[in-house]
Amino acid sequence: MTPADIREVVLEILADIAPDEDLGDLQDASPFREQLEMDSMDFLDIVMELRKRYRVQIPEEDYPQLVSMESTVRYLEPRLREVERVPS
């Protein structure tokens, strides 16, 4: 997957988790929590959805690397490079 593909996946997941949020103005470098009304459970939902869709394991100690779109894409890129979407 390319960085653009990963960004789209994260946007899809965010739209599912926070359907009332306007993701059109999301700044890639700013933390999600500063831009969206997300709590820790919402964050865990993102992690669980990535695991479900792509079978990617994200250790708890790596969670700080998923604070913004930019850092999330950077973190996921090597892990999803060869991954195809798992059918639902």
Image (cartoon, grey):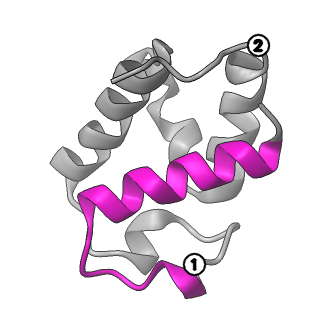
- Give the x, y percent position of residue 29: 70, 67
Residue farthest along the left direction in this orientation: 41
Determine whether the residue tagged by mark 2 lies in a helix, strand or loop: loop
Q: Is residue 79 left or right of residue 88?
A: right
Quadrant showing the N terminus: top right
Question: For residue 82, which numbered disc appears in the image?
Answer: 2
* Quarter-of-image position of residue 17: bottom left
Residue 26, which numbered label? 1
Q: Earlier in the sequence, mark 1 or mark 2?
A: 1
Which of these two is toward me, 77 or 31?
A: 77
Of 50 and 75, nearer the camera is 50
Residue segment shown in magenta: 3-25
Identified at 41% across, 85% down, the residue is 22
Indicate whether residue 46 is drawn in magenta.
Answer: no
Which numbered disc, 1 or 2, marks the residue closer to the eye?
A: 2
- Residue 20 vertical position relative to residue 50 in the rendered view, above or below: below
What whole-number distance in Å separates the C-alpha atoms at marks 1 and 2?
Answer: 27 Å
Residue 48, labelled with which disc?
none
Q: Quadrant of the C terminus?
A: top left
Magenta part, dominant SS: helix
- Under mark 2, the amino acid is Glu
Quick one: 28 or 2, which is closer to the camera? Answer: 2
| Residue at image point 76% right, 13% down | 82
Taking the spot 43% from the left edge, 76% from the top edge, the residue there is 34
Q: Secondary structure at mark 1?
A: loop
The residue at the point 66 percent across, 52 percent down is 7
Residue 74 found in image quarter: top right
